[in-house]
Structure formats: structure tokens, C-alpha cells
Amino acid sequence: MVEEIKKIKVLEIGAGKDCYANKGDEEVIHLDRVRLPHVEVVCDVNKEKLPFNADSFDSIYMDNVLHLLDDTIKIVEECYRVLKPEGKLIITVPHYSSFNAYRDLLVKHHFTRFSMDYFKKDNNLNFYSNARFKVKYELKPSGIGKFLPSFIRDKLCFFINGLIDEICFEMVTEK
């Protein structure tokens, strides 16, 4: 008897024109607020809940979307709801010190490496949300920041803009 290979179910929020590519072992659903050729689900997450049952996805991917949305906590809670236990939420946003964080008029929020601490079990500000995640982050350097050791660059970015371009959060649900 041949075992059925179970595909990882992935949701991309804010698919836009350049969508997340299927890696073969994934079933990817692309969601955006506008109808595009590759978008299977149209939903304005600023106004609506995600149209999926709880515990539906293994992974959710948001690439340069969260900083454009109205309510960061609300959308992260919605992602938590539809993620399975041990599900991954992967968020990439401009770092607050990046020039890209300020030149786009649509940007509503700025992020540091501490921004997602509200969702950690051991954070003293976690009373703003019931969603709990293990949170890791990676700072993606730009310009001269690429040539500096990370322990120096990650401190200097508080004083010198343009050393860090983006921050990528990898958050794993704790249900």
C-alpha cells in the first residue's frame, strides 16, 4: 500500500503581483484584497476575518504586507486562529531604520526586533493579546550594513539609518 504524501498547507496574505512560489510539497493559497490572476481568495483583512476555519494552515507567509495594514494585533491574532498548533507565521517588513520604511505613503507601522514580543508568553505586555508565539527574528542588512559584523550593526542601527533594510520574524504558535 502506498502512503499518501501530505502537502504542507500555506497561506500567503497580500500575494500582490509577485506571489509566493510553491515549493512542490506545499499547497499554497494566495490571498489579496484585489483579484489578480494567481489570487484564489479575495479578502480585505483590514475589514474582514480570514475566511478559513481554525487550525487550517501549517504556515502563513506575509512579505512586506503587515506594515501596510490597520491593526497589527488583530491580523496576527487572525493568523494565530487559522494556524495549526506549531504552525509558522513568517512576516517580513521594513526595519524602522530603513529608508524604505519612510518613503512609502502607505506605511502605517514601523517595526523593530522587539515588535512581536507582545505575543510571547513571558513578555510583561502580553495582556494585549491571547495569541502566543515563540518568536525569532533576522535582521537583513543593506548598504554599508552588509559589511559590518552583526553585533555592531544591530546596535548602530538605532543611531544610523540605512544599515538594516528588513526584519523577518519567524513565529511558531504555542497552542
Image: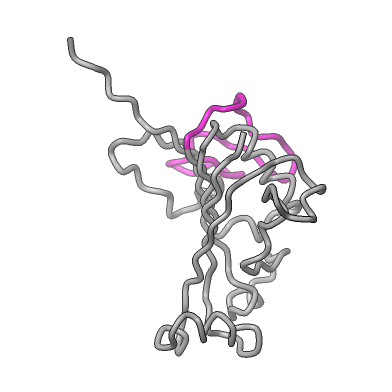
Seen in the picture, residue 126 relative to 86 is either above or below; the reply is: below
Residue drawn at 70 percent across, 34 percent down: 49
| Quarter occupied by residue 55 | top right
Residue 92 image position (x, y, % from top left): 53, 60
Quadrant of the rendered structure where residue 33 is? top right
Where in the figure is residue 77, as x and y percent of width and height? Answer: 69, 41
Q: Residue furthest top?
A: 1
Question: Image quadrant for the N terminus?
Answer: top left
Left or right placement of residue 28 versus residue 126 in this view: left
Q: Is residue 36 magenta?
A: yes
Q: Residue at x 70, y 52 (%)?
A: 122
Q: Is residue 158 above or below residue 134?
A: below
Name, please, the residue furthest toward the left: 1
Magenta segment: 31-58
Taking the spot 61% from the left edge, 46% from the top edge, the residue there is 133
Q: Which image quarter is the C terminus in?
A: top right
What residue is drawn where x is 63% and y is 29%?
51
* Magenta region includes residue 170: no
Rendered image coloring scheme: one colour
Q: Decide whether the magenta segment is chiefly helix, strand or loop.
A: loop
Front residue of this view, candidates 153 and 90 = 153
